[in-house]
Amino acid sequence: MIKKIAVLGAGTMGHGIAEAFAMYGYDVNLYDTDENKLKVALKEIEEEQETLVEANFIESQSVGLTLKRITLCTDLKQAVIDRDYVIEAVPEILELKQNLFKKLDEYCPSHTIIASNTSSLNLTSMMEHISDKRKEQMIVNHWYNPGHLMPLVELSYFGNMSEHHFKEVEQLYQSIKKQTVKVLKDIPGLIANRIQQGIAREVFSLIEMGVATPDDIDKALKFGPAFRYATTGQLEIADLGGLDIWCTVGDNLLKVMDHSQHANVMLKQKVASGKLGIKSGEGFYDYKQDEIATIKKRFAENLIHQLKASQFYIDRSSIKDEEPSNKLNER
């Protein structure tokens, strides 16, 4: 049974992953080579927990308990030497991950399952330098940002891991109320990112053609397809609407839609001119420096409300005889 967790990398994804496990009672070591980065991450976790309290998602006393479950580490060996499950969330550089996994193979107990948060690198390549035995305990677990709020985790099932080990990981994520997806083929982007890029490609194309303002295009998505996607998958929607209708519309529209094989030219131009979005103060929208914190908090609050609603929906749809709840389980 997985009880002790280590998360490697205290950046945007790493701190959110550590926070998610700690919220549900797990003992978590959060590792980074930069001690200051670890301190910043812990402060961010505290602020995110306070937002959850304000949204009535957790009780105020649970914030301190969550923080106490997280131990900050700058020594890799000490961070993983007694862990049952280790997740790396370091930069997407193959050689960096290969070297890290080689060390983890040496430092971790023999039973430890090692996971990568990548969605773009090949699992076989990443575990090239580790032992054959450990390869049977390697998995891709791709989280969505922000990790403490987004329910989705994609799990690889590429043939290297036994059903027993996979179930162990799956049950771990179920215990922290994540929705897991079993990915059967090692393809770039896995599942969710490929779907998202398909939508983004057409959205960027519509902006480039001047079809509507950014606000109206976002509104069309939020109150059109995305409104249904919050509770209903694309295949369910197709069945409900009629596959004959989808076939006809596809024949009419797909030939005139964007089919680019590269990032949108307009998007590249914005990046080249330093218009990176909220991080630079301008992207498709303008952001005043003194409003950025409020915008980020509002985004988190919206996700929390959506998370509450989705948990209620999942509980009501489940075959399990459980009462829906918006509060975390005590461990």
Image (cartoon, rainbow, N blue to C red):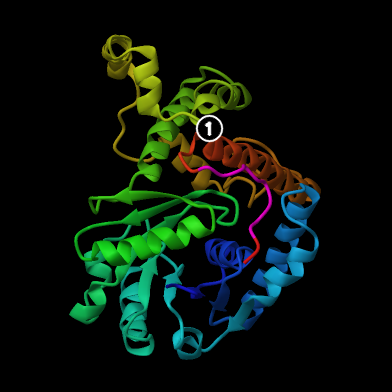
Q: Which quadrant does the N terminus fall into?
A: bottom left
Residue 303 in the image: state x and y as whole percent. Answer: 64, 43
Q: Which residues are magenta?
A: 321-329
**Vertical relation: 268 (above or below) 156:** above
**Vertical relation: 282 (above or below) 34:** above
Q: Which quadrant does the C terminus fall into?
A: bottom right
Residue located beneath label 1 in the image = 230
- The quadrant in which residue 134 appears is bottom left
Observer-nearest of 6 and 178: 178
- The quadrant in which residue 125 appears is bottom left
Residue 251 in the image: state x and y as whole percent. Answer: 26, 13
Observer-nearest of 52 and 276: 52
Residue at 63% in and 63% down: 23
Residue at 53% in and 61% down: 13
Which SS type dominates the magenta stretch? loop
Observer-nearest of 144 and 138: 138
Q: Is residue 209 visible?
A: yes
Residue 63 in the image: state x and y as whole percent. Answer: 74, 65
- Look at label 1 and name its amino acid: Ala
Q: Is residue 140 magenta?
A: no
Left or right, residue 61 beside residue 69: right
Residue closest to the far front? 321
